[in-house]
Image (tube, helix red, strand yellow):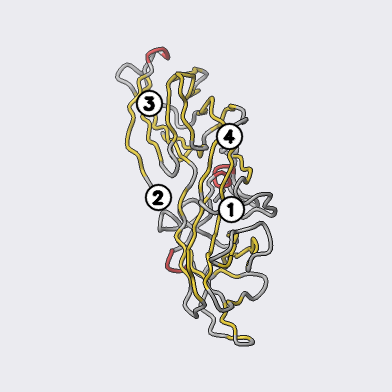
Amino acid sequence: MLTAGLSSCSGESMEPNSDIANGKVAMEFTFSHPSQSRATETSFETGDVVGLYVSEADKTLEISGNTVNNEGLSFTGSAWKSSRNLYWDAGNYNVYAYYPRLDEISSITDLPFEVETDQRKATGSSMGGYEASDFLFASAKGIQASANPVHLQFSHIMSKISIRLIKGEDFEGELPETATVYIHNTVTEASIDMMAGVATKALRGTRKTVTARQADPTTYSAILVPQRLENRVPLIEVVMNGVSYLYESKFLFKPGIHHIVNLVIDKNPDQLKIEIGGEITNWN
């Protein structure tokens, strides 16, 4: 469950520390956002917190009792810092990281997580609805104690959809620069396997409506739980100037994929046309 924030990826690291206490080597980490670029949405920014687990390689990751348990690493703008010093012992280890960090982990293999239904909420003193819905995951296996930082590459495990509004030939005037865009009939609850980095639609989850956030004057985006809509249902609704344009369809929301959908808006709301665009990985 992990959007994280931004700044150049080359600076998104826990700075190497050559200090050795009691013969132990300090743990150091570098993190890369899937987009490999800035923050707020494309990378990490000051104050972002990653959750970290370290377990012995021959042991199963547990909620507690690991070498490191859900440790929070905060981005300072140039480095990742924990509230206490972390050190390696001899041996091999597996490292797991996720974003955004949760205060409590109730299960390693069946962690409940839910995307926000109103993703228009902007990032401010607290995380915005869109960012809070974008769960990121990374892992590294068979790590040995070293003064060199362990590098972790994050991946999106949720699905993203972007709806581009395109003016049809018979649409009078210009498209308004503000609209409300809904994605209907998707289950917003998921179960996350923290060892595998996989999100699965909750079996008893309820279908809800997600309100997309506006990315630019004609594009609206939302983070959704990966799932397949087997039957044709009301899916995308655009409301502008008091008129509702509704598109019904089946759909497969793939994990880690950014789906692009072009909606051609004509004068008659019943003549809505759709063009399925590309699929993008490692999106911003």
Q: Earlier in the sequence, mark 4 or mark 2?
A: 4
Please identify the quarter of the rendering in which residue 204 is found: top right
Q: Nearer the viewer, residue 38 or 88?
A: 88
Mark 3 crowdedness (10 Å alpha carbons): few <14, some 14-19, many ≥20? many
Instruction: Judge whether 192 appears above or below 260 on screen.
Output: below
C-alpha separation, residue under disc 3 versus residue under disc 4: 23 Å
Q: Label 2, on which residue? A: 282
In this view, the mark in front (3 or 4): 4
Q: Label 3, on which residue? A: 263
Q: Earlier in the sequence, mark 2 or mark 1?
A: 1
C-alpha separation, residue under disc 4 versus residue under disc 2: 21 Å
Kind of residue at disc 3:
Leu
Mark 1 crowdedness (10 Å alpha carbons): few <14, some 14-19, many ≥20? many
Q: Label 1, on which residue? A: 100
Residue at the spot x=44%, y=58% of the render? 38
Callout 4 touching callout 2 (CB < 8 Å) = no
Please identify the quarter of the rendering in which residue 51 is found: bottom right
Instruction: Judge whether 254 appears above or below 1 on screen.
Output: above
Q: Earlier in the sequence, mark 2 or mark 3?
A: 3
| SS class, disc 2 | loop
In this view, the mark in front (2 or 3): 2
